[in-house]
Image (cartoon, grey):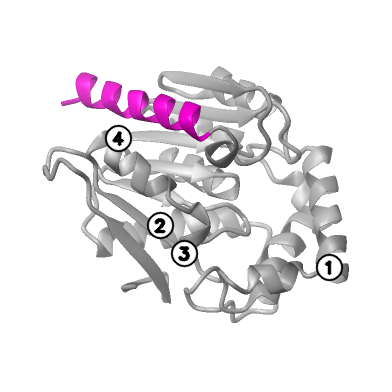
Amino acid sequence: MPQVSAAGRRLECAWIEGAAASAALPTLVFLHEGLGSIRQWREFPQEVARATGCRALVYDRYGYGKSEVLGEARVGVEFMHDGALNELPELLENLNIDNPVLIGHSDGASIALIHAGTYQVRGVVVMAPHVFIEDICVDSIQKATDQFQTSDLADRLSKYHRNARKTFHLWADAWLDPEFRKWNIEEYLPRIKCPVLAIQGEDDEYGTMAQLDAIAAQVGGSCELLKLPHCGHSPHKDQTEKVLHSLAGFIKKILGTNP
């Protein structure tokens, strides 16, 4: 896969061509979850590109997947801000992507919101987003950390990440840092003027519907919510058809109201 330089790091990326090759259509940029990567999206980006006709970009953030391995002992509690305000803008500039639609999952959703509250984007889709810290999330990450030490989770993650142990601790150590309890990105929400689609499962083990309600109450533009029963932290895997239908309709509305 090709690589691109952003924020002084080499990042792996993948392009997915849409059915309607038109410069008028926005590029969809996918932002993976805290332990995610290009490959862990599975076929979802291709399905979205096919349903919308839009070209899509999927990439591994620094420290994840096949991108450059984390060089530091650990990242700081502002690692999502770094991804949104340093890495992503430079990546978009270097790839000549203007005014994209951001599609983020979990940590990637939070990065999308921070970025959209600072830079111009065409629209934002967030799945299982975090805008403030909840006990349920910290407790689940602690359980994942315990599991990482006592199971084959590291081996399973090594299929996707160049250094699974560093990737895991990049994510878990930041979230479990006591300073991270102060983390909150609600200040960015009123600055988001583009349309937003926020999706979450009712059985999400990393967050409650309070996250979606905060987004809906505070964003500066229009906001649609999709709250899914019988769905956990990965709506695009647990309820693929519903998520795909909602996301495709959302993007088509953007194209209709903002030609």
Q: Earlier in the sequence, mark 3 or mark 1?
A: 3
Q: Is residue 48 above or below residue 40?
A: above
Q: Earlier in the sequence, mark 1 or mark 2?
A: 2
Per the model, the C-alpha gap separating discs 4 and 3 is: 23 Å
Q: Which mark is residue 51?
A: 4
The amino acid sitting under disc 2 is Leu
- Determine whether label 4 and label 3 are within 8 Å by CB: no
Q: Earlier in the sequence, mark 3 or mark 2?
A: 3
Q: Which residue is mark 1?
A: 151
For the residue pair 116 and 246, the one nearer the viewer reads as 246
The amino acid sitting under disc 4 is Ala
Q: Which residue is mark 2?
A: 88
The amino acid sitting under disc 1 is Ser
The amino acid sitting under disc 3 is Asp
Q: Which residue is mark 3?
A: 60
Magenta stretch encompasses residue 1: no
